[in-house]
């Protein structure tokens, strides 16, 4: 197996043309900042353009799949002017769009909790497999924020009604609930997660590479998914850039970082 290290991610390419990108920031629960977002987007683009690669897997090291955005980074970005703030938010939108639109099948391997943008990564993949230990949460409103750039992918995966509930309540939900509402396809014990991943990848490799890519094109054509619209990437970035620069957004982030309740939370 060939291995290429590009901190904060590592890409492994097996002899069967399967690329596994692993998030490597376990000390902060694989939260992503501008560096990780840009490196991951470029790596996905590189793999999409590699004619040898037939399947792309997104995985993570440590106890968590991804805690979503690094709040120290978001707080720093929100202090920038509106243009810089929106451009920064748009970069996350570009990452989600790149992952969702890849010609190869994409598989999310969720070994632990996925929060906020981490849920977006799962929703943007074609197939998601979760450990029974995994938990999910669209936690943004607890911080005075909104799940803007990941919104189209989450709604596409679980539907408007379920998205409305979980985006508004910010409640945690189990891997089995995630399967029930359509966010993940399979839930398995942690000790067989890799075995199930191999089974799914083997099934994908039995399909014709061009046929698999055309299936993705066909489904996009049939559904006319909003996730295919460049305007959505731009506009959702504008939504989060605006909200995270508000007093409420700044208070929510500060409260979390200070480990205190936000001002709007009653005792």
Image (spheres, rainbow, N blue to C red):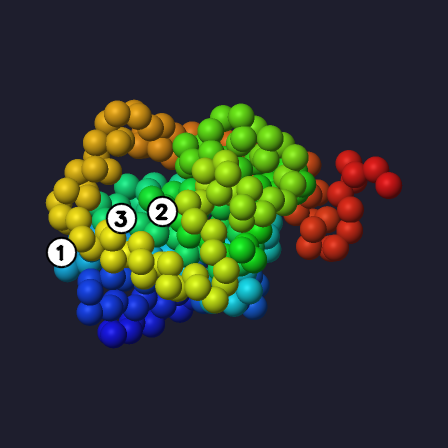
Residue under pointer 3: 105
The reply to whether the C-beta atoms of the residues labelled 2 and 3 are less than 8 Å apart is: yes
Q: CA distance from mark 1 to mark 2?
A: 21 Å
Query: Does residue 77 lie above or below 12 as drawn?
Result: above
In this view, the residue in front, 153 or 80, is 153
In this view, the residue in front, 229 or 61, is 61
Q: Which mark is first along the chain, 2 or 1?
A: 1
Q: Nearer the viewer, mark 1 or mark 3?
A: 3
The x and y percentages for residue 96 are: 38, 44
Left or right position of 256 against 125? right
Q: Which mark is first along the chain, 3 or 1?
A: 1
The x and y percentages for residue 179 are: 48, 43
The x and y percentages for residue 64 are: 54, 60
For numbered disc 1, what is the local secondary structure?
loop
- At 55% from the left and 42% from the top, the residue drawn is 177
Residue under pointer 2: 127
Q: Which mark is first along the chain, 3 or 2?
A: 3
Q: CA distance from mark 1 to mark 3?
A: 13 Å
Query: Does residue 229 lie above or below 80 as drawn?
Result: above
Residue under pointer 1: 51
- At 79% from the left and 39% from the top, the residue drawn is 265
- At 24% from the left and 51% from the top, the residue drawn is 204
Q: Residues within 10 Å of mark 1 (few under 14, many from 20)?
A: few
Left or right position of 159 against 206? right
The reply to whether the C-beta atoms of the residues labelled 1 and 3 are less than 8 Å apart is: no
In this view, the residue in front, 12 or 111, is 111
Q: Is residue 147 visible?
A: yes
The x and y percentages for residue 205 are: 20, 55
Left or right position of 41 against 160? left
Q: Is residue 25 visible?
A: no
């Amino acid at each position: 197996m060939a291995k290429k290290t590009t901190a904060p991610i590592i890409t492994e390419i097996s002899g069967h043309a399967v690329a596994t990108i692993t998030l490597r920031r376990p000390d902060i629960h694989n939260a992503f900042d501008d560096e990780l977002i840009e490196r991951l987007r470029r790596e996905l683009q590189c793999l999409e353009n590699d004619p040898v690669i037939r399947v792309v897997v997104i995985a993570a090291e440590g106890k968590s799949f991804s805690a979503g955005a690094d709040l120290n980074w978001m707080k720093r970005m929100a202090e920038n002017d509106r243009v810089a703030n929106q451009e920064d938010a748009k970069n996350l939108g570009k990452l989600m769009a790149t992952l969702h639109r890849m010609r190869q099948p994409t598989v999310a391997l969720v070994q632990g909790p996925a929060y906020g943008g981490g849920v977006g990564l799962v929703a943007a993949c074609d197939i998601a497999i979760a450990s029974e230990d995994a938990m999910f949460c669209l936690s943004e409103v607890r911080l005075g924020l909104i799940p803007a750039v990941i919104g189209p992918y989450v709604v596409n995966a679980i539907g408007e009604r379920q998205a409305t509930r979980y985006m508004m309540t910010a409640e945690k939900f189990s891997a089995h609930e995630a399967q029930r509402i359509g966010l993940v396809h399979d839930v398995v014990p942690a000790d067989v997660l890799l075995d199930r991943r191999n089974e799914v990848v083997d099934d994908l490799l039995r399909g014709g590479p061009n046929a698999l890519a055309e299936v993705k094109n066909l489904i996009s054509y049939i559904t006319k998914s909003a996730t295919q619209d460049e305007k959505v990437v731009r506009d959702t970035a504008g939504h989060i850039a605006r909200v995270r620069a508000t007093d409420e957004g700044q208070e929510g982030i500060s409260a979390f970082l200070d480990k205190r309740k936000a001002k709007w939370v009653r005792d």
